[in-house]
Image: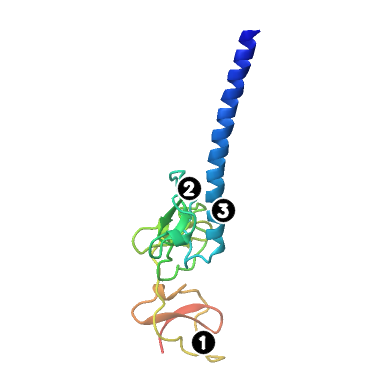
Amino acid sequence: MNAQVCCSLIAVLLCLSVCLSTTDAKGRAEVKRNVRLDEESLPGKPGVCPDDKDMIGACVERCFGDRECPDDEKCCSNGCGHVCMPPYKEKPGSCPKPVGAGVCAEMCSGDSNCPNNQKCCSNGCGHQCMLPYTEKPGLCPMTLAGVGGSCEELCVNDFDCPRNEKCCSSICGGRLCTPAS
């Protein structure tokens, strides 16, 4: 019987030890969780966190809100924990309009997935990195009813037109390159 009492006492002490250390850890975690809730109630810094879909970072909470991050950095998910990182910035320029259906695969999810000045654009079915086009300055000339014009789609956007010409709509619904006015 002494052995049973001794084993029971050891089991109780072991359990008590585990319970106390768990309570201590929970107490600390509770304090951090409250800090996080207070931090989240404050307005965040402008900008959007990068998409964490393809990130695999350390499962460590290095920040609990934007106010803990330097300069314009935000407290963002790294796929498991949270770390300070620069906000996602959309690259300048516009995506070309898709012509037909491209490859039905998501090769990018945002401009940050694309090299250099390429943007993540729709290809008509999926998304892929493409060079942006910049709309040329000037306006399309006014088209008058009854005046001709091509009914074909000879361009999709200004990127398709040479020099200072713009891609403009014709009266019958086509698009053609014409000098800007």
Q: Residue at x 56, y 91 (%)?
A: 146
Residue 123's spot in the image, x, y percent?
49, 60
Query: Can you give x and y, in whole percent of width and height, for residue 179 in the image?
Result: 39, 85
Label 3 vs label 2, nearer the camera = 3
Of mark 1 and mark 2, the one earlier in the sequence is: 2
Screen quadrant of the C terminus: bottom left
Badge 3 element: helix
Residue 72, by quadrant, is bottom left
Q: Foreground mark, 1 or 2?
A: 2
Image disc number at residue 34: 3
Marks 3 and 2 sit apart, C-alpha to C-alpha, by 17 Å
**Mark nearer the N terminus (3 vs 2):** 3
Front residue of this view, candidates 11 and 86: 11
Label number found at residue 148: 1
Q: Calculate the distance from the C-alpha at mark 1 to the C-alpha at mark 2.
A: 62 Å
Any part of residue 50 in sight = no
- Camera-side residue of 179 and 120: 120
Q: Amino acid at mark 3?
A: Asn
Q: Amino acid at mark 1?
A: Gly
Q: Which numbered disc covers residue 81? A: 2
User: Looking at the picture, which amino acid does disc 2 mark?
Assistant: Gly
Name, please, the residue furthest toward the front. 2
The residue at 43%/45% (across/down) is 57
Q: Which of pointers 3 and 1 indicates the residue nearer the eye?
A: 3
- Left or right position of 66 against 17: left
